[in-house]
Amino acid sequence: MEAVMEEDRKKICSNTDVIKKERLWQEVYAGTYTSEKSKGVYRFLFNRENAEMTEPELFYEAGNAKWVSLSGDMLAFPVEKEGRAGTCFVSLKDKAAKRVGEILEEKDTPCFILQDGEFTYTANYHDGTVMVYHMGKDGPVIAGRIENGREAGCHQVIVHGAYIMVPCLTQHVIRLFDRRNGFRTAGTIQFPDGSGPRHGVFDHSHSKLYVVSEWSNELFIFDVQDNTFLLRQQLSVLPAKTAGGENKQKASAAAVRLAEDERFLYISVRGLDLLTVVDVSGRKAAVLEHVSSGGEHPRDFVLTGEGGHLLVANRFSGGIVSMKRNRESGRITGIQSRISMPEGVSLVIRQ
């Protein structure tokens, strides 16, 4: 009897070790622009303990699959084929990924995709459209199309209660649409000419909105009540030495992420190849530091679930870089590992 119990104990310990080992590794999906060296959506593993990454493998071949969105087990990304463009949906529920469907109703591939569990939204920079999809029993179907004007620079969709918000970069405005009322126009947030609002993020309570501008390289901080937005602060995300001249002309802010504890904000700046860290814990936000992105043209990055690392996608060189983050100070303390990824644009971690 004791021998049997000992054998069972060994099996349990063995299984626990396997489970623990498996939990250390997380799946990461990367979207890319199509080139001779990049062919679509890639997949690699990230080790939560030591920040190592496995070399990426092609997960799904598709033209200009530059943005990846994950909601539950549903992965969505842009596709381009035979002169048509749109969005593809792939289920990760089973070990063998299964394409659920694709809709090709756009002239250009969207640059951003968001799934909120009910709808899927895509923002199209060149077409100026926001497509709204609903998952029917036979696959995705179009639930709406919002026109903002050709070359409006639609770069993101943000859900805010009953509204969706669309930064229109070239129009220097964020447009609000009412989800309860057929996505009709529900207001605008006007930005200064020449600013180019690109991406934004809310705090957990949706009482603050942080928006980064691509052209003026600024952070706009709004106090929020329902759909009323009061600008509280506006500050540069560039180092002081680039306040003018050629370097400022090269700078182009891109992604913005808020740490889980809402004390620190992170912004990627292409051209200067930097990550800007902003302390937003006090009454006034302040730039904490500027650090190298570890490559050229940091388009997107993500914070890991525990918040101890950032994964940065450098599009032109440097590949994917894992960087250590001090959760107390907010500072980035060094590069942990690096893998190759030509034309890497966006990242999503499967939790």
Image (cartoon, helix red, strand yellow):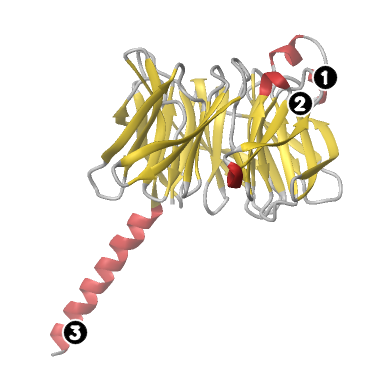
User: Looking at this view, is 141 or 122 the one in front?
Assistant: 141
Identified at 52% across, 52% down, the residue is 305
Q: Amino acid at mark 3?
A: Met
Q: Residue furthest bottom?
A: 1
Q: Is residue 174 left or right of residue 33?
A: right
Q: Residue furthest front?
A: 181
State the CA–CA distance, disc 2 to disc 3. 64 Å
Q: Position of residue 336 (x, y in %)?
A: 51, 39
Residue 176 visible in rendering: yes
Mark linked to residue 243: 1
Marks 1, 3: nearer the viewer: 1
Residues at discs 2 and 3 in contact (Cβ within 8 Å)? no
Residue at mark 2: 238
Residues at discs 2 and 1 in contact (Cβ within 8 Å)? yes
- Eyeballing the image, is 55 above or below 283? above
Marks 2, 3: nearer the viewer: 2
| Secondary element type, mark 1 | loop
Q: Position of residue 298 (x, y in %)?
A: 57, 26
Mark linked to residue 182: none
Residue at mark 3: 5
